[in-house]
Image (tube, grey):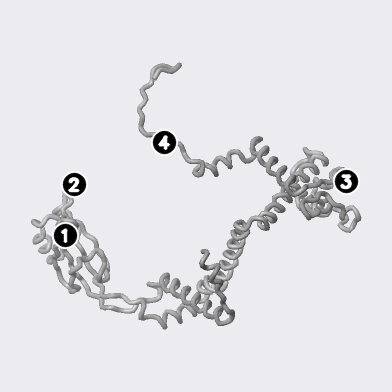
Amino acid sequence: MLTDFGWHIVRLIERHPKESYESVKDELFTKIKGTDRGNVIIKSAHDQIKEKYHFNANENVLPYFISIVTDSIYKGKWTFDKNSAEMKNTAFSIGNEKIAYLKFAEYIDERQSKIRSTEKSVPELINGFYKAFEENTLKEFYKTSLALENTEYANLLQEYHDGLLIYDLMQKNIWEKTKNDTIGLENYFEKNKANYKWETRVDALIGSTANNQIIDQVVQMLNQNNSEEDIKAAFNTEEKVNISFTKGVYESGHTALPKDFNPQTGIAVYEVNNNGIKTYVIIKVNQVLPAATKSLEEVRGRVTGDYQNYLEQEWMKTLRNKYKVEINKKALKKL
């Protein structure tokens, strides 16, 4: 490829297909928001709301507030008389709602503490406050009206509200109780110990190799109490690993143990076939630990989860006994 800077060799590594609108919608919205184009879109949406719900503004509202707001606003100390007759005047109306001067005065009062400089004059501040106040009021009115006009949206809001309510109830009656009620958790564990048991376990060293020529030598070295490091040093090279080891306490059925594993002390060799690949597992069992009940500390996470489920079931029983549940079968069939 020839450019103004000379010849270039370009290699195509990968083609990226055009992304769908849904996948880039949020990113595009973020880029547009706050730009001149975004402001045009927002103004257009507000104009549509105004037209649809017959917005009507009082042209005297701005001159009035410009006349009563003093320079004290720069220090966050401007005050107004809530009981004055003017505060009952209507700043603007939308639909069946009338927004009084008082609402705008309270809006200014709440935001005056955020003024950080005197670069803008009082009239400029009031105009900016009024524009934001009007936009916020329009958005809130539209949300409320949409819930009344759009059943699907109203149902979505109700589901969201109910979800938050259920979350708060679960937090109070179950999750917080599980977290703080240590005595209740301990009592639950004591009553249900049978559900938290260790199967037979072994304290063992497990070796794995695909080379059956070294098995007898490995067993011999284990019988002589050579360490795993000694055995690996004897059979592994930089080019090839002939044997690897793991050690620990393993419960019957653990994936590291062969299916036909027999839990008894001593050394045993097992042949394992994994998808046609034959390997040999050499196990030295140092100690067999019989089946036993686990301590609460060993299974605290599991017990906590079970205790939460228990509390939820008991809570549901209480609710069913206290309140009558009626199912609308016709509505249920529509789901």
For badge 3, the amino acid type reads Tyr
In this figure, which residue is indicated by the disc labeled 4?
16
Which of the two discs, 1 and 2, labels the residue nearer the N terminus? Answer: 2
Of 297 and 174, nearer the camera is 174
Real-space CA distance between mark 1 and mark 2, rounded to the nearest whole angstrom: 26 Å
- On the image, the x and y values in percent for residue 189 come to 42, 79
**Type of amino acid at the residue the image marks with label 4:** His
* CB contact under 8 Å: marks 2 and 4: no
Distance from label 3 to label 1 (Cα)?
Answer: 90 Å
The residue carrying pointer 2 sits among few (fewer than 14), some (14 to 19) or many (20 or more) residues within 10 Å by Cα, namely: few
Mark 3 vs mark 4: give the one in front.
Answer: 4
287 relative to 292 in the view: left or right = left
Secondary structure beneath dot 1 equals strand
Tell me the tag on residue 238: 2
Say if residue 71 shows up in the picture: no
Q: Which residue is mark 1?
A: 273
Amino acid found under the numbered disc labelled 1: Asn
Local packing at callout 3 (Cα closer than 10 Å; few below 14, some 14-19, many 20+) is few
Of labels 3 and 2, earlier in sequence is: 3
**Apparent side of residue 77 relative to residue 202 in the rendered image (left or right):** right
Closest to the observer: 82 or 62? Answer: 62
Q: Residue at x 57, y 76 (%)?
A: 326
Badge 3 marks a residue whose secondary structure is helix
Q: Amino acid at mark 2?
A: Glu
Q: Quadrant of residue 169?
A: bottom right
- In the rendered structure, which disc, 3 or 1, sits on the residue that comes first in sequence? 3
Residue at the disc numbered 3: 64
